[in-house]
């Protein structure tokens, strides 16, 4: 059976080929994203391997199903871009990589916190230009501050542990609490209380209809003045327009993003010679207290190796008609 891999970058080939040495599957790599326009490329491939910006909505699923595709294998944890109801209706199967390295994403989130707080990216440029002044670089001790972790799954729990290591008090919110949170030093509180008490709010929940714009104007108004907001989860959890207003008002003191609501047309591509058409995104980049990275939280050697291995194992399970521990289904 044949697998078509969409949105391929050179590093994807490297880690998928390495994992495939154990299986010797027939894999074809395509650079373009999966969309209605590129769906024809999947014709004759039983399995389609996709990533965060591929379009797996109903229309595209119908097109690739007509072409013979029966399995969708996501090489990522989030699957908000997959219409699982259509997967089910068409009798297809879908899988993902639920855990590869929660440390990769949590450590990146902490990187954003440290960089924003101590303005390390600004120091880098200053020192290179022979400017050794400290004005504008004043930070604060993380020790003793209160951090609010929204979503206490795999990444959120690692985040709690790291933040506790800095000596932060850690508040947590999750509609599905786990005893692990308390064991790692977190304390569950209602969401409103987390917003009210936290100096740092960091998002680690999935994007669902319930979490879409969880951080909106109302939520921001409940937060401390000068709050630090970190999103390494999915862009749609933040209402970007409301966040920009919060930055303009000074309500939000620091913003660290690894994801953005409309990132599909921007991230993972070199657009350095293009005119960015997204005015909301462009406005974000004008603030001195905003740091944006382009969805690189997952991007460590350990995580890519684990993604490759689980992706190939999922393909093997589907092709052989076995139960797959990483199967995703519509609820
Ligand atoms: P997970 O499934 O282990 O944990 C998610 C947690 O969110 C669960 O405990 C769940 O109960 C909780 N949750 C669900 N609805 C919620 C709500 N309304 N409010 C608060 N919490 C809620 O997932 P994970 O592996 O920890 O990953 C979390 C998210 O991180 C993923 O969904 C994905 O979007 C994102 N992610 C980003 C990157 C990156 O590169 N930036 C990489 C991997 C994952």
Image: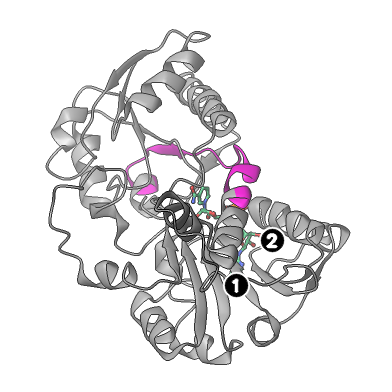
Question: Front-most of 180 and 270?
Answer: 270
Q: Quadrant of ligand 1?
A: bottom right
Task: Determine if the magenta segment contains residue 252.
Answer: no
The answer to which of marks 1 and 2 sits earlier in the sequence is 1
Position of 284 with respect to 295 (left or right) is left
In front: label 1 or label 2? 1
Question: Front-most of 98 and 150?
Answer: 150
Which x, y percent locates residue 143?
Answer: 78, 68
- Quarter holding the N terminus is top left
Asked if the beta carbon under badge 2 is closer than 8 A to the nearest atom of ligand 1, the reply is yes
Query: Helix, strand or loop at disc 2?
Result: loop
Residue at 38% x, 83% y is: 242
Which x, y percent locates residue 177?
Answer: 75, 66
Q: Which residues are magenta?
A: 88-107
Res. 204 in view? no
Residue at 51% x, 60% y is: 132
Q: Is residue 106 above or below residue 66?
A: below
Position of 282 with respect to 217 (left or right) is left
The local crowd at label 2, few if under 14, some if 14 to 19, many if 20 or more residues have their Cα within 10 Å, is many
Which x, y percent locates residue 113?
Answer: 59, 62
Asked if the beta carbon under badge 1 is closer than 8 A to the nearest atom of ligand 1, the reply is no
Query: Helix, strand or loop at disc 1?
Result: loop
Q: Which residue is mark 2?
A: 152
**Quadrant assignment, res 91:** top left
Can you tell which mark lies on residue 305? none
Q: Which residue is mark 1?
A: 138
Which x, y percent locates residue 17?
Answer: 42, 15
Task: Determine if the magenta segment contains residue 95.
Answer: yes
Residue at 37% x, 73% y is: 287
Residue at 88% x, 58% y is: 183
């Amino acid at each position: 059976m044949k697998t078509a891999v969409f949105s391929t970058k050179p590093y994807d080939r490297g880690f998928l080929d390495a994992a495939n040495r154990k299986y010797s599957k027939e894999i074809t790599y395509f650079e373009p994203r999966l969309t209605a326009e590129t769906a024809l490329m999947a014709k004759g491939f039983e399995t389609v391997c996709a990533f965060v910006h591929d379009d797996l909505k109903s229309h595209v699923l119908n097109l690739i199903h007509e072409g013979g595709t029966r399995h969708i294998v996501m090489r990522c944890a989030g699957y908000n871009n997959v219409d699982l109801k259509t997967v089910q209706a068409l009798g297809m199967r879908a899988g993902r990589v639920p855990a590869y390295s929660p440390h990769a994403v949590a450590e990146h989130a902490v990187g954003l916190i440290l960089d924003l707080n101590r303005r390390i990216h600004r120091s880098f440029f200053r020192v290179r230009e022979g400017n050794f002044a400290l004005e504008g670089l004043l930070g604060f001790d993380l020790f003793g501050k209160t951090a609010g972790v929204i979503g206490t799954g795999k990444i959120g729990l690692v985040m709690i542990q790291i933040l506790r290591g800095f000596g932060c008090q850690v508040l947590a919110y999750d509609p599905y609490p786990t005893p692990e949170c308390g064991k790692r030093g977190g304390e569950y509180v209602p969401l409103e209380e987390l917003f009210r008490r936290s100096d740092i709010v960091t998002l680690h929940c999935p994007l669902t209809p319930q979490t879409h714009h969880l951080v909106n104007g109302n939520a921001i108004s409940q937060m401390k003045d000068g709050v630090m907001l970190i999103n390494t989860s999915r862009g749609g959890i933040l209402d970007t327009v409301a966040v920009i207003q919060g930055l303009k008002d000074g309500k939000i003191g620091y913003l660290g993003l690894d994801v953005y609501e409309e990132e599909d047309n921007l991230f993972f591509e070199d657009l350095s010679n293009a005119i960015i058409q997204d005015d909301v995104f462009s406005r974000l980049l004008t603030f001195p207290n905003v740091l944006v990275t382009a969805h690189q939280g997952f991007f460590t050697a350990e995580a890519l190796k684990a993604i490759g291995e689980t992706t190939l194992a999922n393909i093997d399970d589907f092709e052989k008609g076995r139960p797959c521990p990483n199967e995703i289904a519509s609820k």
